[in-house]
Image: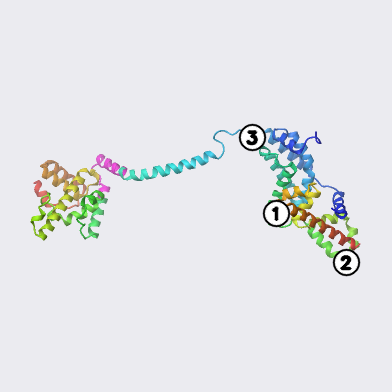
């Protein structure tokens, strides 16, 4: 620092030196005393940022674990609920069944092509609707023998027909199993008729009649197969 | 007690609940800090900034650690608060003394004697300081008002030793030139 700078420095310190007002002094000193008088709150085990972070993590984990489970259980719960409604008030129209019926009818209309004959069991397990589409196309041969025919002794055309018959009978068996195992609420009219025909075949005529009555009650507009009614007489 | 105990120890005492220690600390630093703020922000904002800075010191007592001198820590807080103030003001210079100096610089070509008669040298120096670039003004005030060395100035302003030294040198040169300019017209 040269002499000129020292002059500037001394000149700077020459004059009056403004400072804070008394009011400002008092305010700051009062704040400092207040801060000391009120000690900082002791931190409890649930203070700080970790509870919030832990809560968020818990919500995420629960969501990831529970949502898939709930999604899987939802159809089952809906099914149970519908069954309960049905059993508690049988006179009420079965919306689930009606919806299923309508969907089946629409699919029948939109899908004119028959279902491929291969892997019928798998398809039956997967969808009742697919089953309903396939059955009318093969209904003419569905009442034939259910056992596998001797394919080697027949002509090619006969072989093809026999193979189709075998496949269809497999479908029929799976379908009947599905009708038996399916809850009451989701039986479509076609499935119901299959169930009735099975009961007739087994000789349970009274039960079959009762099932037909239920079918009429729940699907009043449905045209029941006349041959089935004939058998019941 | 005042002269014996260091700023750092006073602050540590205050951290442990001794309010009197803070009062001593406050009395030591209030005037230089006030002027440091005043020269940069102007009269309009000085009280607000001054109070904010001391409240920041009070609220930081629990986390205070002696990593540097108390003065360095205090002026670091002050500087940050002033920068924040500048940002809020969109870097608009608040000090009206700059305009005053411009008026003097223009008029003195016409009637320099009258100008010098109208105000003393100190006032002209204050006006010249107000017109310094912000970095140079800050370095000048930290040296003259707070009494810090170049190294501490560099530490507070976050620049190298050389940069701090350069800022200080330019500040003095500009002030010198300004005062010489006035003397030439005497």
Q: CA distance from mark 2 to mark 3?
A: 64 Å
x then y, percent, for residue B30: 78, 43
The chain letter for the residue carrying disc 1 is B
- Answer with left or right where residue A7 lies relative to residue B77: right
Q: Are marks 2 and 3 in contact (CB under 8 Å)?
A: no
Q: Quick one: label 2 or label 1, which is nearer the N terminus?
A: 1
The kind of secondary structure element at disc 2 is: loop
Is the residue A168 above or below the residue A63 in the image? Answer: below
Residue B183 left/right relative to B48: right
Distance of mark 3 from mark 1, alpha carbons?
Answer: 32 Å
Chief SS of the magenta region: helix
Q: Please determine if labels 3 and 1 lie on a single subunit.
A: no
* Residue A91 visible in this rendered orientation of the protein: no
Cβ atoms at labels 2 and 1 below 8 Å apart = no
The verdict on a common chain for dots 2 and 3 is no
To the question of a shared chain for discs 2 and 1, the answer is: yes
Looking at the image, which residue sits at the far bottom? B110
Q: Which residue is mark 1?
A: B86
Residue to which mark 2 is pinned: B110
Secondary element at image label 3? loop
Tag of residue A40: 3
Q: Nearer the viewer, residue B55 or A208?
A: B55
- Dot 3 alpha-carbon crowd within 10 angstroms: few under 14, some 14 to 19, many 20 or more: few
Q: Residue B129: x and y, percent? A: 80, 55
The residue segment tinted magenta is A77-98
Q: Nearer the viewer, residue A106 or A146?
A: A146
Taking the magenta stretch, the answer to whether it contains residue A1 is no
Q: Dot 1 lies on which element? A: helix
């Amino acid at each position: 620092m040269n002499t000129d700078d020292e002059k500037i420095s001394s000149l700077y310190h020459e004059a009056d030196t403004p400072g804070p007002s008394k009011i400002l002094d008092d305010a700051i000193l009062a704040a400092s005393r207040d801060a000391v008088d009120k000690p900082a709150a002791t931190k409890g085990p649930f203070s700080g940022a970790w509870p919030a972070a832990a809560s968020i993590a818990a919500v995420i984990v629960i969501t990831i674990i529970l949502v898939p489970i709930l999604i899987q259980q939802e159809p089952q719960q809906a099914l149970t609920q519908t069954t309960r409604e049905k059993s508690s008030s049988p006179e009420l129209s079965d919306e689930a069944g009606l919806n299923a019926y309508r969907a089946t009818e629409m699919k029948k209309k939109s899908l004119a092509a028959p279902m491929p004959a291969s892997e019928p069991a798998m398809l039956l397990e997967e969808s009742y609707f697919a089953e309903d589409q396939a059955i009318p196309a093969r209904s003419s041969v569905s009442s034939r023998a259910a056992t596998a025919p001797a394919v080697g002794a027949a002509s090619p055309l006969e072989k093809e027909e026999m193979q189709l018959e075998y496949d269809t009978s497999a479908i029929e068996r799976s379908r009947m199993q599905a009708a038996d195992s399916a809850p009451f609420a989701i039986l479509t009219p076609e499935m119901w008729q299959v169930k009735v025909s099975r009961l007739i075949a087994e000789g349970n005529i009274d039960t079959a009649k009762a099932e037909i009555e239920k079918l009429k009650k729940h699907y009043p507009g449905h045209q029941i197969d006349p041959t089935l009614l004939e058998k019941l007489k | 007690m005042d002269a014996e105990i260091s700023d750092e120890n006073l602050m540590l005492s205050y951290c442990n609940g001794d309010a009197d220690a803070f009062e001593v600390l406050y009395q030591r630093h209030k005037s230089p800090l006030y002027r440091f703020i005043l020269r940069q922000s102007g009269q309009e904002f000085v009280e607000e900034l001054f109070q904010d800075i001391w409240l920041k010191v009070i609220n930081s007592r629990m986390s205070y650690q002696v990593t540097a001198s108390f003065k360095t820590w205090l002026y670091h807080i002050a500087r940050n608060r002033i920068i924040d103030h500048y940002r809020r003001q969109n870097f608009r210079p608040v000090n009206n003394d700059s305009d005053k100096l411009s008026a003097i610089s223009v008029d003195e070509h016409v009637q320099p004697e009258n100008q010098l008669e109208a105000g003393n040298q100190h006032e002209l120096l204050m006006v010249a300081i107000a017109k310094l670039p912000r970095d140079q003004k800050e370095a000048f005030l930290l040296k003259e008002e707070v009494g810090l060395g170049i190294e501490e100035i560099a530490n507070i302003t976050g620049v190298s030793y050389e940069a701090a030294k350069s800022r200080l040198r330019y500040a003095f040169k500009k002030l010198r030139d300004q005062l010489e300019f006035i003397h030439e017209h005497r």
